[in-house]
Image (tube, rainbow, N blue to C red):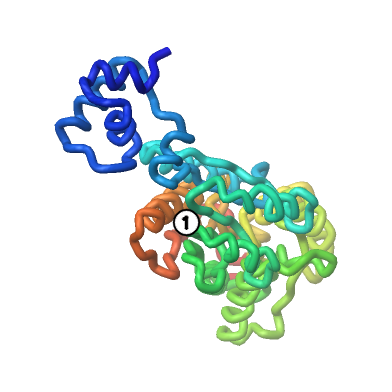
Amino acid sequence: MSGIADVARLAGVSKSTASRALTGGGYVSDGTRRRVTDAAASLGYVPTTSAVSLATGRTRTIALIVPKVNRWYFGAIVEGVERSLIPHGYDLTLYVAEPGSRDRESLYSTYLARKRFDGIIAVALEPDDSDLERLVAIDKPTVSIGNALGDIATLGLDNVAITRIITEHLITLGHTDIAFVGSTPPTDAPARDVDERSIGYRNAMNDNGLAVRIRAVPSTLTITDAYAAAASFLADAANRPTGIVAACDEVAIGVMIAARRLGISVPTQLSVVGIDGHDYAEMFALTTIEQYPRDQGTAAAGLLISMIEGVAAPLRTPAATRLVVRASTAPPRSV
């Protein structure tokens, strides 16, 4: 296996010059840099990350913190971040730590404290999470995907606005009895994005004279829990709503499965809208506000790399969304 000495010999320079040319650790003329990089390429030599770190003070590694990866949204973000980092020559260190878990405590007390990275991308942290102070104390360039976190650069959604849009979509179709499914169960920790989506629904109902029809059904943001919650309240035909605003697409899909098993036709008897643009949304013909987590991951990584290079980042960057109307919504039978 070739080493730096072989590269220097082939390029006709000293080892220190070859090292500077390959790691960016000092001045080298353009002509010399080209000779060294050509020699390295011909020999198949790649500088180790430790060598680059010693020369530049950088690790060329990004830390990505997610609460879990077995959910569509978080997995898509990981893909997007990695897609952006590779062309820029950065490695990715993935930390998966659910709130309140022992792994999360170890993450902050041990792994992040070592600072073996140039910057951090944090996904779905809560603004009042005690981890926020610890994250800031690490003193590395940081980008948040999701909730706005103080002075940390954030790429996120206007959850209040997008939920108003889908609620008003149902109201425009003629629905007046509309429920919100997916509010945080009382036994769970508050979730800012869900709370904001509930506010968007309530604002739309209030502004359209439907305050007396406001109702929220608790459920975690999973297909299985939403199915169980929907199977219970949809079975009451006398009090069944004609429209459902779901806190996310997985909740919407759980509601639709429950409706079908109860013999309730979607959308003839029940219209359902979601938020996310989940991979399953088209298969279920779900009307939804699409967001694009892969693109969010790509954008967040690009933003962080710019910050590492010394470019100031905007404090808030809105994520793209789009209302996609499919066959899960229609006017109620009486309209």
Quarter-wise, where is residue 288 in the image? bottom right
As drawn, is 214 to the left or to the right of 335?
A: right
As drawn, is 310 to the left or to the right of 211?
A: left
> Which residue is painted at 61% across and 62% down in the image?
135
As drawn, is 175 to the left or to the right of 239?
A: left
> Which residue is painted at 58% across and 75% down in the image?
200
Say which quadrant the N terminus sits in: top left
The percent coordinates of residue 214 (x first, y second) are 70, 78
The percent coordinates of residue 282 (x first, y second) are 53, 45
The residue furthest top is 1
Q: How many numbered markers are drawn?
A: 1
Quarter-wise, where is residue 6 in the image? top left
The percent coordinates of residue 232 (x first, y second) are 84, 59
Q: Which of 181 and 35 is in front in this view?
A: 35
Say which quadrant the C terminus sits in: bottom right
Please name the residue that numbered disc 1 is placed on: 324
Q: Which of 197 and 314 is in front in this view?
A: 314
> Which residue is painted at 35% across and 59% down in the image?
310
Tell me, yes or no, if residue 284 can be seen here.
no
